[in-house]
Image (spheres, rainbow, N blue to C red):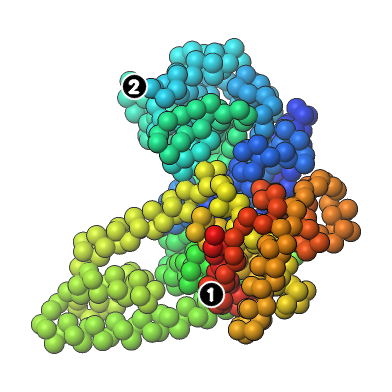
């Protein structure tokens, strides 16, 4: 069964069961402080999981484009992906455990025709905060999973929360038996031996975790599920890796044809990072030295390093992009629409990185000279890491050049420093995700509303060409990216700041209306007006000043927001400016 067929079956099945199909949100989140990219299907639905009414109702389903960057360095093995697609269905205070589990069982066994004997499930074992989830276990048994294939695990395996505070609850996970031999007499889904592969996760949000560590019951119980399309495709096709499926096969084959020094790990890295980069660029991402732009730059540059490693000429990038567009356009028509932009961005970054490699080689020569003068025959790990971290110079290139000159590199020390660097990156990614459900409070809601005022003020002062291209909100400040070709003048910055403060002082009422996408467009609401919107949308109107499509939440009136102060205006990337601002009370 091909990936497109699995996706269609999923959406149609849940539509038949009363769910409204909603479009995938972009990979570049709008007004979401929690992450650099959309990392899960629930992320765009945060306001509705917290109790806001969704225009499409209480039962939703979609496929969501996702990027997770914690394990970039792991890509190249047989399973890690940076970009992936998540299929999901949600109950927003509607059905709960029994219906959710029955639908999951029916989809797996009837629609995908997975034999029941291939399935095992896990449930929450219970602790001092919440009881053992016998309800889910009984539901699975009733649906058709034998008792001996229902396992109970603790919070580390079967409990879900975004961050340290917020809505959370036990989850139940479904596992597929690959048929590989058991690792021992006690082999079960918690093993990493490869026999069991997790395929689906249903989260039952019925608790709220407070800052003091206590749990209380939520008024609205939600169900939040996620099924990885690439993994399911691989399993149903009996393939060893996602790279063996139709999603990657054409590009993997072309890379094998072009490579003069073939290496399967390098081909996987190139194929995965190219697809991920194309998806990010198509949704508005651009390479830079910070945040998501830095992640995109890392992906492109790592891909280029491995093209060099297996000796594929870099001018073949254009051909590789064409192959991916042709292969994926049925699932992602936006790739064909944005093909020229994708090519231009990747090729421009390739040119920049070629210069970086040349710069790195010059720095390497300087370090070699120092090493010789000091009578060394080994390049210190600190130097190898400096070349990598400061100049983007790949350690494998450093090693290759050192070997040519009769030197070795201090690999243990480099690996030690690299692991520390990796751990910092992981902590940073975790911190970015720490927001999400937990961070919607009075301060962040005020900042969210302020981005609407800022957006309109920028349009008024600079012109209608201004469009939001991203934002990041914390309790301390807002950051707002927008399209504008040049640096703002001091006078323009002051005008924007004054205009926002004028609206705050006017104590404007904030009104929310639900309307069709077409009516929102006709009403003059600000919006990207792409196919990301569903049939009905929420439009927030701030007095007579701002009207914008948004999921919320916002303040009810502007008077209590505080004084708006722009702290910095700077370049974010080519054609994109960035404002950092605070609200002072």
Q: How crowded is mark 2: few (under 14 residues within 10 Å), some or many (20 or more)?
A: few
Which quadrant holds the N terminus? top right
Secondary structure beneath label 2: loop
Q: Which of 127 and 247 is in front in this view?
A: 127
Q: How crowded is mark 1: few (under 14 residues within 10 Å), some or many (20 or more)?
A: few
Tag on residue 186? 2
Where in the figure is residue 30, as x and y percent of width and height?
64, 57
Q: Taking 2 as reference, is 516 left or right?
A: right
Where in the figure is residue 15, as x and y percent of width and height?
77, 33
Foreground tag (1 vs 2) = 1
Secondary structure beneath label 1: strand
Q: In the image, what residue occupies the spot 34% across and 21% down?
A: 186
Q: Nearer the viewer, residue 445 or 236?
A: 445
- The answer to whether residue 18 is visible is yes
- The answer to whether residue 230 is visible is no
Tell me where residue 437 sits by quadrant.
top right
Q: Taking 530 as reference, is 163 left or right?
A: left
Q: In the image, what residue occupies the spot 54% across and 16% down?
A: 135
Where in the figure is residue 321, as x and y percent of width and height?
63, 67
Tell me where residue 75 sits by quadrant.
bottom left
Q: Nearer the viewer, residue 245 or 486?
A: 486
Q: Nearer the viewer, residue 305 or 311?
A: 305
Tell me where residue 320 sits by quadrant.
bottom right
Q: Name the residue under label 1.
A: 568
Q: Mark 1 to mark 2: distance in Å?
A: 59 Å
Say whether disc 1 or disc 2 marks the residue closer to the N-terminus: 2
Tag on residue 412? none
């Amino acid at each position: 069964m091909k990936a497109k067929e699995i996706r269609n079956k999923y959406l149609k099945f849940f539509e038949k069961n009363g769910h409204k199909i909603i479009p995938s949100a972009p990979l570049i989140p709008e007004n979401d402080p929690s992450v650099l990219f959309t990392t899960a299907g629930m992320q765009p639905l945060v306001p509705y999981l917290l109790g806001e009414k969704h225009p499409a109702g209480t039962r939703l389903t979609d496929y969501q484009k996702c990027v997770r960057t914690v394990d970039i360095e792991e890509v190249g093995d047989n399973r890690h992906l940076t970009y992936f697609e998540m299929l999901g269905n949600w109950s927003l205070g509607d059905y709960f455990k029994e219906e959710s589990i029955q639908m999951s069982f029916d989809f797996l066994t009837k629609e995908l025709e997975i034999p029941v004997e291939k399935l095992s499930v896990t449930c929450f074992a219970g602790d001092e905060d919440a009881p053992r989830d016998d309800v889910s276990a009984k539901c699975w048994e009733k649906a058709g999973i034998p008792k001996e294939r229902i396992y109970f695990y603790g919070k580390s395996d079967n409990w879900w929360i975004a961050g340290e505070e917020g809505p959370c609850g036990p989850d139940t996970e479904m596992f597929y038996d690959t048929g590989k031999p058991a690792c021992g007499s006690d082999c079960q889904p918690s093993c990493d031996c490869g026999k069991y592969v997790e395929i689906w996760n249903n989260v039952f949000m019925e608790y709220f975790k407070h800052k003091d560590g206590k749990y209380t019951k939520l008024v609205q119980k939600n169900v939040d599920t996620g099924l990885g399309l690439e993994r399911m495709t691989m399993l149903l096709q009996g393939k060893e890796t996602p790279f063996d499926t139709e999603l990657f096969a054409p590009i993997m084959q072309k890379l094998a044809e072009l490579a003069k020094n073939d290496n399967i790990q390098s081909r996987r890295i190139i194929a995965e990072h190219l697809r991920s980069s194309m998806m990010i660029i198509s949704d508005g991402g651009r390479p830079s030295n910070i945040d998501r732009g830095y992640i995109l730059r890392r992906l492109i540059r790592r891909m280029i390093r491995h093209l060099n490693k297996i000796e594929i000429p870099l001018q073949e990038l254009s051909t590789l992009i064409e192959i991916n567009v042709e292969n994926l356009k049925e699932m992602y028509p936006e790739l064909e629409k944005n093909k020229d932009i994708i090519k231009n961005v990747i090729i421009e970054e390739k040119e920049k990185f070629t210069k970086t490699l040349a710069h790195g080689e010059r720095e390497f020569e300087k370090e070699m000279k120092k090493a010789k003068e000091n009578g060394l025959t080994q390049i210190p790990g600190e130097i190898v890491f400096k070349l990598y971290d400061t100049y983007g110079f790949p350690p494998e290139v450093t090693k290759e050049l050192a070997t040519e000159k009769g030197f070795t590199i201090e690999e243990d020390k480099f690996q030690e420093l690299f692991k520390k660097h990796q751990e910092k990156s992981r902590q940073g990614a975790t911190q970015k995700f720490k927001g999400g459900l937990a961070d919607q409070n009075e301060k962040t809601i005020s900042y969210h509303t302020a981005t609407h005022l800022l957006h309109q003020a920028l349009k008024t002062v600079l012109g209608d060409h201004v469009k939001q291209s991203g934002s990041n909100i914390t309790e301390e400040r807002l950051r707002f990216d927008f399209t504008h070709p040049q640096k703002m003048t001091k006078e323009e910055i002051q005008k924007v700041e004054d205009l926002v403060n004028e609206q705050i002082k006017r104590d404007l009422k904030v009104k929310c209306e639900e309307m069709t996408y077409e009516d929102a467009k006709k009403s003059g609401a600000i919006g990207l007006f792409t196919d990301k919107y569903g049939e009905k949308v929420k439009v927030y109107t701030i007095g007579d000043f701002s009207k914008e499509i948004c999921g919320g939440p916002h303040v009810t009136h502007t008077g209590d927001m505080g004084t708006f102060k722009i702290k910095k205006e700077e370049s974010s990337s080519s054609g994109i400016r960035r404002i950092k601002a605070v609200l002072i009370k």
